[in-house]
Amino acid sequence: MLQPYIPVMLVTAFVIVNAILMLGLSHIFSSYRRTPTKIAPYESGIPVLGHARERFSVKFYLVAMLFIVFDIEAVFMIPWAAAYQQMHQLRGVLFVEMLVFVVILVVGYVYIWKRGALQWD
């Protein structure tokens, strides 16, 4: 009864043993020495400016929201186009769904535009 699951169990066991073995060997053979250069935070090759707990400006959050709006747009429109092409009987519903989605995106875009997130200082 368990015979069909033996290959899956063997692969799972191999993966677990392999992961433990690689982590253990890298820990044993590593020559990790803490130096000031290694423990310093790295940010694009630029020395750290300011404190990590300082407040971010609202502009940072507006740019992040802009990225999310356009990222979700791209992720949603590609599968929608494939479904729209394949489902002939639901084309009206799919078209209305995309119109609602695009209207929501336009509202987000106009909000970000009016708040000045698209202007670089």
Image (cartoon, rainbow, N blue to C red):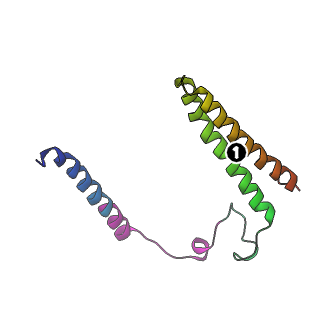
Which residue is located at x 28 percent, y 59 percent?
16
Circle 1 is placed at which residue position?
70
Q: Nearer the viewer, residue 18 or 37?
A: 18
Residue 120 visible, this angle: no
Residue at 80 percent across and 61 percent down: it is 59
**Quarter of the C terminus within the rendering:** bottom right
Position in image of residue 46 (x %, y %): 72, 64
Find out whether residue 37 is within the magenta segment: yes
User: In terms of image quadrants, where is residue 104?
Assistant: top right
Residue occupying image coordinates x 43% and y 70%:
31
From the viewer's perspective, tell me whether residue 66 is left or right of residue 75: right
Residue closest to the eye, 47 or 6:
6
Instruction: Look at the image and give the residue range highlighted in magenta.
Output: 21-42
Whether residue 80 can be seen here: yes
**Is 107 part of what is drawn in magenta?**
no
**Foreground of the two, 30 or 63:** 63
In the rendered image, residue 118, in percent from the top left (x then y), is placed at 84, 50
Residue type of the residue flagged with mark 1 = Phe
Q: Position of residue 27 (x, y in %)?
A: 37, 69
58 to 10, vertically: above or below: below
Indicate whether 113 appears above or below 99. below
